[in-house]
Image: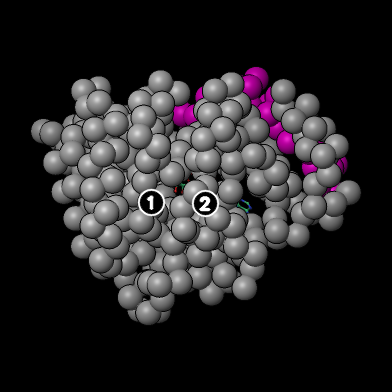
């Protein structure tokens, strides 16, 4: 088995290379997804020792959880996987609103359990903050579910530093999931220092900045779906980002690795980042991302990469 890392202060141990699954059944996020390919992505991950799966109610909605549930049942491997999901999205007259009320979160966990065809969720995140619920009350509801054995660890996602501190008043937050990548580094100002000081695991989402940090795009690449609207992919900004990726390519070549592997290894070199969850649309990408575990970055490499993207 690959090296296993502990997630913060939890009793969950994972391969540091996890799998983000918003492209598994996430028809509302990516155009032209095929459910069978999505299931094959999940099977491939499990067959290659990836045991940390990241999904959410809203991926689909519901479909990503359902497909993962089907694969885990088919393979009979629920106990070998650390399953993370998220809830907070609610549809009101066809529009999404966020709800962190204890009643909503408890109902969200119950419905995720059904779709995932399991009786416990390893890590349940409040996906987005709402405006009204005190965050320690919201986390208190998850603590009750943890005490009942329905979830094993408590996560929050997309919280500001103020919301995170309020959520963690009683020290119950195990994991924070936030956007963080070499092209978006605001988390270094407050969230990352707080998680490091408080034994909270930090899971960066969009680790490959939706693909640009995998080093395969050129200035002529055309995008559709969410990437077509992503500010990192627009005009001059996109060209500057490609130039930075080219500098990184030189470092990757020295290491005998690809850009994506060096990028993922760079996150894992940071305090409190115990695991990464790159997304994948094809089984080959899942296998490819595992090469990250072979990349050895020195402190100087980490610093040089940081400078390129400053
Ligand atoms: N908490 C939240 O609010 C939140 C928000 C967003 C995402 N997430 C989580 O974070 C995960 C990761 O985010 P993401 O998937 O949107 O973005 P990402 O990991 O930054 O980028 C994933 C994309 O990069 C490309 N890729 C992946 N591996 C590659 C490889 N080895 N070589 C070349 N290209 C590769 C694929 O796109 P192409 O094949 O199309 O190029 C893939 O869809 C999600 O799946 C989800 O679980 C959470």
Magenta region, residue range:
229-253
**Could you say where residue 219 lies in the image, as x and y percent from the top left?**
68, 33
Q: Is residue 55 left or right of residue 194?
A: left
State the image quarter where residue 221 is shown. Answer: top right
- Number of disc labels: 2
The answer to whether residue 66 of the structure is visible from this angle is no
Left or right, 117 with respect to 24, comes to left
The residue located at (52%, 51%) in the rendering is 7
Looking at the rendering, in which quadrant would you find the N terminus?
A: bottom right
Q: Is residue 241 in the magenta section?
A: yes
User: Which residue does the numbered mark 2 point to in the structure image?
Assistant: 7
Residue 235: % across, % down: 61, 22
Any magenta on residue 188? no
Where does label 1 land, which residue?
A: 153
Position of residue 259 relative to residue 95, above or below, is below
Q: Is residue 69 above or below residue 265?
A: below
Towards the viewer: 54 or 60: 54
Q: Residues within 10 Å of mark 1 (few under 14, many from 20)?
A: many
The disc, 1 or 2, on the residue closer to the chain's N-terminal end is 2
Disc 2 residue crowd, few under 14, some 14–19, many 20+, Cα 10 Å: many
Magenta-highlighted stretch: main secondary structure? helix
């Amino acid at each position: 088995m690959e090296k296993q890392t502990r997630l913060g202060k939890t009793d969950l141990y994972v391969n540091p290379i996890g799998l983000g699954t918003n492209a598994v059944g996430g028809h509302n996020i990516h155009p032209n997804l095929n459910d069978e390919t999505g299931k094959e992505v999940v099977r491939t991950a499990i067959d290659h020792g990836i045991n940390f799966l990241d999904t959410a109610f809203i991926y689909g909605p519901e479909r990503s959880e359902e497909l993962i549930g089907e694969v885990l049942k088919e393979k009979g491997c629920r106990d070998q996987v650390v399953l993370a999901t998220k809830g907070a999205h609610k549809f009101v007259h066809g529009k999404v609103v966020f709800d962190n009320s204890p009643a909503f979160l408890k109902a969200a966990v119950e419905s995720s359990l059904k779709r995932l065809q399991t009786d416990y969720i390893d890590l349940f995140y409040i996906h987005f903050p709402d405006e009204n619920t005190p965050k320690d009350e919201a986390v208190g509801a998850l603590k009750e579910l943890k005490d009942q054995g329905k979830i094993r660890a408590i996560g929050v996602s997309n919280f500001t530093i103020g919301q995170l501190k309020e959520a963690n008043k009683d020290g119950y937050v195990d994991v924070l999931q936030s956007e963080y990548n070499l092209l978006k580094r605001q988390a270094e100002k407050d969230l990352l220092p707080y998680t490091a000081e408080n034994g909270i695991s930090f899971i960066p989402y969009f680790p490959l900045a939706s693909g640009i940090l995998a080093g395969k795009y050129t200035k002529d690449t055309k995008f559709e779906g969410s990437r077509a609207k992503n500010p990192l992919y627009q005009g001059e900004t996109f060209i500057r980002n490609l130039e930075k990726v080219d500098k990184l390519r030189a470092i990757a070549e020295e290491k005998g690795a690809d850009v994506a592997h060096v990028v993922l290894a760079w996150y894992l070199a940071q305090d409190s980042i115990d695991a990464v969850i790159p997304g994948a649309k094809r089984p080959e990408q899942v296998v490819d991302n595992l090469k990250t575990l072979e990349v050895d970055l020195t402190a100087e490499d980490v610093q040089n990469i940081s400078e390129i993207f400053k």
